[in-house]
Image (tube, rainbow, N blue to C red):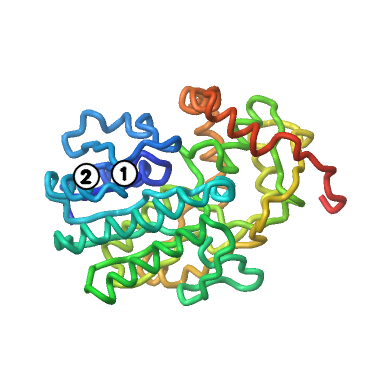
Amino acid sequence: MKNYLVTGGAGFIGSNFVTWLLEHHDDCRVVVYDKLTYAGNLNNLLSHRDDPRYAFVQGDICDAKRVRDTLKTHAIDTIVNFAAETHVDRSLTDAGSFINTDVFGTYVLLEAAKELGLERYHQVSTDEVYGEVLEGAADEQYPIHTRSPYSASKAGGDLMVLAYHTSFGLPVTITRGSNSIGPYQYPEKVVPLFVTNAIDDKPLPIYGDGLQARDYQYVVDHCEGINTVLQKGQIGEIYNLGTGTETRNIDMANLLLELVGKPKSLLQYITDRPGHDRRYALDVSKIRALGWQSRHSFSQALEKTVRWYCDNEWWWREIKNGTRYQAYYQTHYSGREVAPPPEN
């Protein structure tokens, strides 16, 4: 694995993975293939512009000809697929784009990998395919029980990947990661939304009672986990990536406000999201057996993330001041305020 095609490489986790690869593998070449939708941002990759090992191709993974041409032109031997529509809220109003990118786009990539005999195809997936895990933790054999168009589309892509391994012998691996936080995450997601709102003394919208539990992991740990699976993982297998511990959203919000030095009066409760999963929890013993585990605790990951957004207003202010972002924010959060629940 020397010549990587990182699809969705201008997005949050993808761009961090590109940086990790270029910093840790001197002999690799990385081609970022990205459609540059609202969440794709070439500013995420500014530090690599002059690196001869890096190249960028703008393209849609649903475009079979452009995918194949890119693979051939750059002699790609490994695809790492981050390209996806990812935000649950958006999937509730535009499910079709999620099905198109996350399922059909995955099929296009798999067909190209099969046709050209690539050395590896890796699918970056999510813990959300397991749905609510109200007790215990989901291992890789846990039943898929999707509860949003987003998670359903990601599960569909996973199943297609496994089918291509079984049917055609394609050398595939899958990672299902928990909620990543860190630099360059588009500020529709909860942590960058909250920290940037807090910096500007704007309300932090808390869904429902705020007691939903998530496994927050630092994005660099996630990238290291993906690399571990690429180097040591068994072909045809799925690996969960996370810290193995959960934090309630309200506790995350309170700690975030402490880090920014802002009052709890900024918490603003709003009507809950339809079908909002109560708890995600991953059993990560399988990946730990390969020698990987998260190096950052939740508090360390949150502190690093908050510090980055405080120090890099140039990156997120341009996004949040844009008319597209403001229209999205108004549509999703306006008029949803409710009284805080008594238990909080």
Give, as a three-letter code, the residue at label 1: Asp
The residue carrying pointer 1 sits among few (fewer than 14), some (14 to 19) or many (20 or more) residues within 10 Å by Cα, namely some
Callout 2: few (<14), some (14-19), or many (20+) C-alpha neighbours within 10 Å?
A: some
Residue 50 left/right relative to 183? left
Q: Where on the picture, by quarter, is residue 26?
A: top left
**Residue 326 x, y percent position in the rendering:** 59, 28
Percent position of residue 242, x then y: 49, 60
Image coords of residue 186 (percent x, y) = 49, 37
Question: If the image is split into quadrants, where does the N terminus sit?
Answer: bottom left
Identify the residue position indicated by label 2 in the image: 66
In this view, 327 is above or below 91 = above
Work out whether residue 34 or residue 53 is closer to the camera in this orientation and state it: 34
Q: Is residue 170 left or right of residue 177?
A: left
* Count of numbered tags: 2
Image position, residue 273 (x, y; %): 68, 51
> Eyeballing the image, is 275 above or below 57?
below
Residue hosting label 1 = 60
Q: Are marks 1 and 2 in contact (CB under 8 Å)?
A: yes
Q: Residue at x 75, y 43 (%)?
A: 270
Image point 23% across, 43% down: which residue? 31
Q: Earlier in the sequence, mark 1 or mark 2?
A: 1
**Which element type, helix, strand or loop, lies under badge 1?**
loop
Amino acid under label 2?
Arg
Left or right, 44 with respect to 207, comes to left
As drawn, which residue projects farthest toward the right? 342
* Residue displayed at 56% across by 44% down: 302
Given residues 142 and 265, the one toward you in this image is 142
